[in-house]
Image: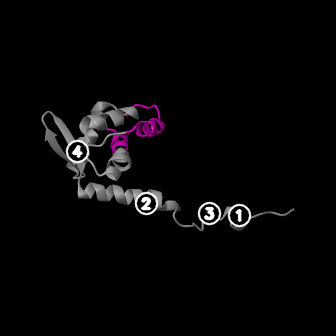
Amino acid sequence: MTDVQYSSSDASTLAIVSSGRTVGAGSASARSALLTILGEFVRPRQRSVWTATLLRALAEIGVEQKAARQAISRIAQEGLLESERSGRCVRWTLTDRGAGLLREGAERIYGFLRTDRSWDAGCERGGSRSST
């Protein structure tokens, strides 16, 4: 399996996502940020990713290393990631369950605008106009 390598456009995307806040240890935001990175950058490439790469990506968006490591560990304990050791380094791969969860999430998020929504009636059809 090939390792994920990020282009400068990926780094730019991470920088745009960054709010400038630091996410502390044990934060649910670290988990959410990790799932976002896995869903946006790892799952589409269907490749493994080094721990250092995940830590660097999470640091770019303000997640402290301790919180990032906890998020990786917890997501692995949930069965969404599996590790493969290479010497002192660890490479992470999405499990089928993890890839499925992220695929379903992407379909919910990005499938949203695939069909016309009746609630988006605009001023003409759905809004009430008062004529004076």
* The magenta stretch spans residue 27: yes
Q: Which mark is residue 120?
A: 3
Tell me where the magenta segment starts and ends, as one range.
7-34
- Residue at image mark 1: 127
Camera-near label (4 vs 3) is: 4
Determine the secondary structure under disc 4. strand
x and y percent of residue 38 in the render?
A: 33, 47
- Nearest the eye: 108 or 66: 108
Residue at the limit of the structure toward the left, as seen here = 87
Q: Name the residue type under label 3.
A: Asp
Q: Name the residue type under label 1.
A: Gly
Camera-near label (2 vs 4) is: 4
Q: Which quadrant: the C terminus? A: bottom right
Determine the secondary structure under disc 2. helix
Residue at left offset 38%, top offset 57%: 105
One can see residue 62 in this view: no
- Residue at image mark 4: 92
Camera-near label (4 vs 1) is: 4
Q: Residues within 10 Å of mark 1 (few under 14, many from 20)?
A: few
- Nearest the eye: 19 or 39: 39
Label 3, label 2: how far apart the Cα atoms are: 18 Å
Residue at left offset 43%, top offset 60%: 108
Is residue 50 shown left or right of residue 59? left
Dot 2 and dot 4 residues touching (CB under 8 Å): no
Residue at the limit of the structure toward the right, as seen here = 132
